[in-house]
C-alpha cells in the first residue's frame, strides 16, 4: 500500500465515521419529533428495528423523556 493509498483509506474512514455521526444525530432528532408528535415507543421501535422498550431505553435518556406511566 502506498502513502497515497493509506491517505485515501484514512480519508474514507473519516468520512464514513462523520456520516455515521450525522446519521445518529438525525435519528435522535427524528425520534424527538416522533415523541413530540405523540408516537408510542412501539411505533418508534418499529421504525428503528427495535422493540418499543428497547427503543425507549436507547433514546429516552438522550431526549430526557420520562418513562410512560
Image (spheres, rainbow, N blue to C red):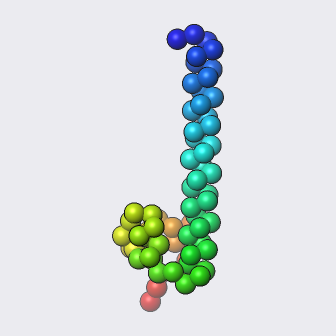
- Left or right of residue 49, residue 33 in this image: right
Report the residue at 44% width, 76% height from top. 43
Does residue 9 show up?
A: yes
Give the answer, above or below, for where 14 lies relative to 51: above
Give the answer, above or below, for where 38 lies relative to 28: below
**Quadrant assignment, res 41:** bottom left
Report the residue at 55% width, 84% height from top. 38
- Residue 60's x, y, as percent? 52, 72
- Residue 33's x, y, as percent? 61, 74
Front residue (pair 17, 63): 17
Report the residue at 47% width, 72% height from top. 44
Report the residue at 62% width, 43% height from top. 18
Q: Residue furthest left?
A: 51
- Residue 16's x, y, as percent? 57, 39
Q: Residue furthest top?
A: 2
**Quadrant assignment, res 49:** bottom left
Q: Residue furthest front?
A: 47
Amino acid at each position: 500500500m502506498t502513502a497515497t493509498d493509506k491517505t485515501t483509506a484514512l480519508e474514507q474512514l473519516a468520512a464514513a465515521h462523520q456520516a455515521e455521526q450525522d446519521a445518529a444525530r438525525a435519528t435522535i432528532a427524528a425520534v424527538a419529533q416522533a415523541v413530540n408528535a405523540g408516537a408510542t415507543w412501539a411505533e418508534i421501535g418499529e421504525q428503528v428495528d427495535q422493540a418499543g422498550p428497547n427503543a425507549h431505553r436507547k433514546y429516552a435518556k438522550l431526549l430526557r423523556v420520562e418513562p410512560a406511566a
